[in-house]
Amino acid sequence: MSDCCTPEKPATCDLAVIGAGSAGFSAAIAAAEEGAQVALIGYGTIGGTCVNIGCVPSKTLIRAAETLHQARTAGRFAGVSAAARVEDWRAVIRQKDDLVAGLRKSKYLDLLPAYNSITHIEGRARLGAGGVAVNGAVIETDRVVITTGARPAPPSIPGIERVEYLTSTSALALETLPKSLLVIGGGYIGAELAQMFARLGVEVTIVCRSRLLPTAEPEIGQALANYLRAEGVRAHSGIAYQSVTQSNDGISLMVRKNGEAEILTAQTMLVAAGRAPNVEGLGLDEVRIAQAADGSIRVDDRMRTSRPGVYAAGDVTGRDQFVYMAAYGAKLAAKNALNGDSLRYDNAAMPRIVFTDPQAASVGATEAQARAARCRVLVSLLPLDAVPRALAARDTRGLIKLVADADTRKLVGAHILAPEGADSIQTAALAIRHGLTIDDLADMIFPYLTTVEGLKLAALAFEKDVAKLSCCAG
């Protein structure tokens, strides 16, 4: 098959991968390393969501805004003062675009020549009985992995179809900052961008149907909402959307809370309340691939769809919408397609990060999830002012919550809200993956004056008053 998968004519390949983002590249590279000939079919900008319009651009802009906050709060140290301002937002955006372009080139475009058995084809793919059709040609294969991702989707609010609004994609490309912004959605995207824009000097209001970070521990969501309010963000939860309209003055959103009607206004609106799978044009109905009510592709724990030989992974499945989980699932899908479905998808120790400040990092079960699984639960809740690192940094915003099985004393969930929480959660992930108990965690040696030491303190706090322990919790 030396001439495999060329786009100019029909061909036969070992595996066709539809979608050339992070998941698609993961599947293609995994298959190539297994010795397979791969057709990697992509439509749109190569690299997908994460590098182009998601993780990379958002996190660099969030860091830019964080420098302003750090300067404004420098006075928490005696004798220190600082000031910072945005002098040229377009320059920040250009720098972001340069970073995106560089990573797209080094992590995607430049990788293709290193894998002779991967042929990249640009075009829309459609599944058929004999394989995959693209650009007027048919790639004959009985093994396919779908990794087409997802896109922002608006919630059902009367009038929203007549309103010009921002999505996470267009918000990250703004070259001029708005005076005021109404953020719809209290999930991780809404929370991150609401805080970012507020720190850049935008008047921000965030609204959500339930509460901020609805899948996080309620203590973390409530604490983060309070921190956002302290930075000037107007946060409204428990909202019922009534209608939205646009005029020359901006956006007006009519909501109802506790039976009372209220109108919220802003210059523009950012919709961050959901995502829709990219499944249009794939021909799923024709080949009888089952979908969920939201259109996402149903898969089992081997990443198999309802059609033999067709697998799916990443955001298009609606499962665990994090780029690292998309890549992980896609690698499993490719290997199972080639080697007989021996690998199972396991997200029991999947870390989840919200890049607000403080960062919300979690792994494993929440307290409610553990109780719903009929587990006898032990809970430790440690405020961050009990962690020496936070005291030394003079920033005690946050908390640590651990959830353990009362019978086995194994750690089943860890939840950190801290300025450096993202870099601390992996220790808890390893503990859950390897079945460590809270006693193992309490006995482990941790470096002093680190945020991750808070995990040891929280483990000790199941049975001790850590305020009565000396430094290093020895």
Image (spheres, rainbow, N blue to C red):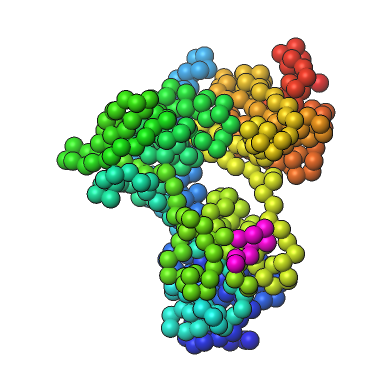
Residue 90 image offset from top left, x and y in percent: 33, 46
Q: Measuring 69% from the left and 38% from the top, which residue is drawn there?
A: 373
Q: Position of residue 342 (x, y in %)?
A: 75, 64
Which picture quadrant has residue 403? Answer: top right
Q: Is-magenta flag for residue 105?
A: no
Residue 304 appears in the figure: yes
- Which residue is at the front of the view, 251 or 366? 366
**What predominant SS class does the magenta segment belong to?**
loop
Question: In which quadrant of the rendered view does residue 199 lie?
Answer: top left
- Residue lying at 55% horizontally and 38% vertically, measured from the top left: 215
Q: Is residue 64 visible?
A: no
Q: Report the front residue among 289 and 281.
A: 289
Span highlighted in magenta in the image:
299-306
What residue appears at the point 61 percent right and 53 percent down from the top-left corner? 325
Q: Residue at x 63, y 73 (%)?
A: 309
For residue 255, side relative to residue 137 (left or right): left
Q: Residue most toward the left?
A: 248
Of 305 and 168, which appears nearest the observer?
305
- Looking at the picture, how far across and down is residue 100, in whole percent? 46, 54
Which percent across, then down, holds residue 460?
Answer: 76, 23
Relative horizontal placement of residue 162, taking residue 148 as reference (left or right): left
Q: Quadrant of residue 304?
A: bottom right
Of the 4 image quadrants, the one containing the C terminus is: top right
Left or right placement of residue 348 versus residue 96 in this view: right
Position of residue 240 relative to residue 391, above or below, is: below
Quadrant holding the N terminus: bottom right
